[in-house]
Image: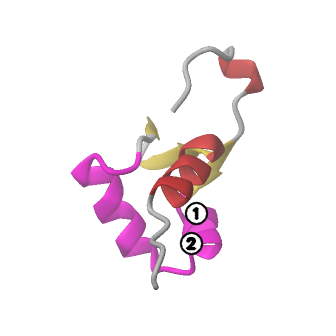
Amino acid sequence: MSTDRPFGDVSFLTVAEVAKIMRVSKMTVYRMVHAGELPAVRVGRSFRVPESAVQDYLRDSFVDTA
């Protein structure tokens, strides 16, 4: 995740929103967060994931099959 933007400009997503975007279960997102594969901020008992981190993860995980 890029750290050159102020936090006011960062858009955060809930775990449910990330799961919907990635078309995986919420448990998969929680596993990715706990494994350090996806950065997140803990807010109370829940997590918020920067939208840019989701975009970066998906872009970097793209597999070219041929």
In this view of the protein, which residue sits in the foreground, 60 or 25? 60
| Label 2 neighbour load within 10 Å: few <14, some 14-19, many 20+ | some
Residue identifier under label 1: 18
In this view of the protein, which residue sits in the foreground, 14 or 36? 36
Name the amino acid type tagged 1. Val
Circle 2 SS class? helix
The structure residue drawn at horizontal position 48% and vertical position 80%, both measured from the top left corner, is 24
Name the amino acid type tagged 2. Met
Start and end of the magenta stretch? 15-38
The structure residue drawn at horizontal position 57% and vertical position 80%, both measured from the top left corner, is 23
What secondary structure is the magenta-colored segment mainly? helix
Residue furthest out toward the right: 9
Q: Position of residue 16 (x, y in %)?
A: 57, 68
Residue furthest out toward the front: 66
**Residue 22, disc:** 2
**Residue 40, disc:** none
Residue 22 found in image quarter: bottom right
**Are the residues at dot 2 and dot 1 in contact (C-beta closer than 8 Å)?**
yes
How far, Cα to Cα, is label 2 from label 1?
6 Å
Q: Position of residue 41 (x, y in %)?
A: 46, 36
Residue furthest out toward the bottom: 66
| Label 1 neighbour load within 10 Å: few <14, some 14-19, many 20+ | many
The mark total stands at 2
> Is 54 placed left or right of 61 in the picture?
right
Task: Tell me if residue 19 is in the magenta stretch.
Answer: yes
The structure residue drawn at horizontal position 32% and vertical position 51%, both measured from the top left corner, is 37
Q: Position of residue 35 (x, y in %)?
A: 23, 53
> Is 52 placed left or right of 15 in the picture?
right
Task: Tell me if residue 8 is in the magenta stretch.
Answer: no
Judge whether 46 appears above or below 11 on screen. Answer: below
Judge whether 15 appears above or below 43 on screen. Answer: below
